[in-house]
């Protein structure tokens, strides 16, 4: 459950006292860490003291925003893992054609996680929580973190989504392409007037679970000037000994990320620091052959585009002689991004015909393809 406590001074100030009571009750119901709960309750007392001080408007807004974030984070909420390897294999095959070696590696990864659930934690691993083995002991000794390495369009992101779907976990994607500051991950101190929380805790709030699958997408494409700082944060995120107490600068309180399942992607490993690579298990994504692309287009891309456009399979037919030209409109491409754009163009033109009242099925041949493909 998310809470919104942001104050608006254009409303009746007398209602602030009632809102403070609601906030206080929410804090107590959330089962927050004791130290954080004390901090938030102290803030509510300070807001009460300042509620009639117009000059304290900004300060009150900042405290309310902080309380909102702290209460909305999933401190104890988690999803239950579904580690059914048969179902996982079905999901991988349903969403991805080929990639047999990659799928096998992912199934091995899930198998390790499944077997870990039956291993009781040691006394040291349980720490102060004797029930740890009953709740989330699986991640005390989790498998190495996967890093899918391959060119654009080879299916890295969709594979990460499939892992989340197979495990029954929420999927969160954090893009690293062009990231220019480590503060985007870790957040900014509240002493800054424009401070905001980092993308890691933003993702957890969105997931409403402390054990989602978080995709660290294209970690090799961060800004060169800030690469060192960002890689330092990544080490902390990916290291099981450190991510148990990840501290966002805005929240300024440790959050346990040990139950998060991180998956990374990159186009290559050249720009990834050695310290980060040491904590990853790279899996090379193979390039698709023309024959594989044709199969993917026929069985996956075209049916999905037709469905999402409100068309039926009878609305469009593409001759077999055309497919070999569709997969290489601009030369060789390791992935299927160009193919998807080409297919999308054809489907849009088909949708336009239907919307204008022409219900006749469209057939594309070698002689008519130039009318429907912009690159020719």
Image: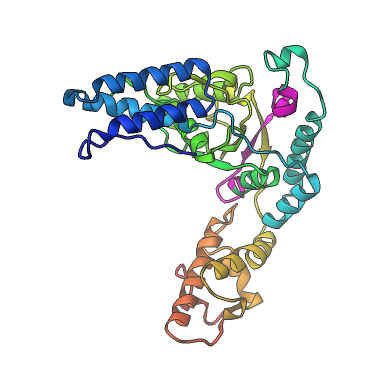
| Colour setup of the view | rainbow
Q: Position of residue 320 (x, y in %)?
A: 66, 75
Residue shown at the point (57%, 55%) measured from the top left: 333
* Side of 46 relative to 372 (left or right): left
State the image quarter where residue 122 is shown. top right
Observer able to see residue 172: yes
State the image quarter where residue 56 is shown. top left
Asked if residue 215 is positioned above or below residue 367 in the image, the reply reads: above
Observer able to see residue 364: no
Q: Position of residue 102 (x, y in %)?
A: 72, 44
Q: Position of residue 132 (x, y in %)?
A: 71, 22
Question: 74 or 307: nearer the eye?
Answer: 74
Asked if residue 311 is positioned above or below residue 70 in the image, the reply reads: below
Question: 212 or 308: nearer the eye?
Answer: 212
Residue shown at the point (52%, 81%) measured from the top left: 368
Q: Position of residue 205 (x, y in %)?
A: 49, 36
State the image quarter where residue 137 is shown. top right
Question: 250 or 337: nearer the eye?
Answer: 250
Residue shown at the point (61%, 80%) measured from the top left: 314
In the image, the segment drawn in magenta is 132-157
* Side of 254 relative to 356 (left or right): right
């Amino acid at each position: 459950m998310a809470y919104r406590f942001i104050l608006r001074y254009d409303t009746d100030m007398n209602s602030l006292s009632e809102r403070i009571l609601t906030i206080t009750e929410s804090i107590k119901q959330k089962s927050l860490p004791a130290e954080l709960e004390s901090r938030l309750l102290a803030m509510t007392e300070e807001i009460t003291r300042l509620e009639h001080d117009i000059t304290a408007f900004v300060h009150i807004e900042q405290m309310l925003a902080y309380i909102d974030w702290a209460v909305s984070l999933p401190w104890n909420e988690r999803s239950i893992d579904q580690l059914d390897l048969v179902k996982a294999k079905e999901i991988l095959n349903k969403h991805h054609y080929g990639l047999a070696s990659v799928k096998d590696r992912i199934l091995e990864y899930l198998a390790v996680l499944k077997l870990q659930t039956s291993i009781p934690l040691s006394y040291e691993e349980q720490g102060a929580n004797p029930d740890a083995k009953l709740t989330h002991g699986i991640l005390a000794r989790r498998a190495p973190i996967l890093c899918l390495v391959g060119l654009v369009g080879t299916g890295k992101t969709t594979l990460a989504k499939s892992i989340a779907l197979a495990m029954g976990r929420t999927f969160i994607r954090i893009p690293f392409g062009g990231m220019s500051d480590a503060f985007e991950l870790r957040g900014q101190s509240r002493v800054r007037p424009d401070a905001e929380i980092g993308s890691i805790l933003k993702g957890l709030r969105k997931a409403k679970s402390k054990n989602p699958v978080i995709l660290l997408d294209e970690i090799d494409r961060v800004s060169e000037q800030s690469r060192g700082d960002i890689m330092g944060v990544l080490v902390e995120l990916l290291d099981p000994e450190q991510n148990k107490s990840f501290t966002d600068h805005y929240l300024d309180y440790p959050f346990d990320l040990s139950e998060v399942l991180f998956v990374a992607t990159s186009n290559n490993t050249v720009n990834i620091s050695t310290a980060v690579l040491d904590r990853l298990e790279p899996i090379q994504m193979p390039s698709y052959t023309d024959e594989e692309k044709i199969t993917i287009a026929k069985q996956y891309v075209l049916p999905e585009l037709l469905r999402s456009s409100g068309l039926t399979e009878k609305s469009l037919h593409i001759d077999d002689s055309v497919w070999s030209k569709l997969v290489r409109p601009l030369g060789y491409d390791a992935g299927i991004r160009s193919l998807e754009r080409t297919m999308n163009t054809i489907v849009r033109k088909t949708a336009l015909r239907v919307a204008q009242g022409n219900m006749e099925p469209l057939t594309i041949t070698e002689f008519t393809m130039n009318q429907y493909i912009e690159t020719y």
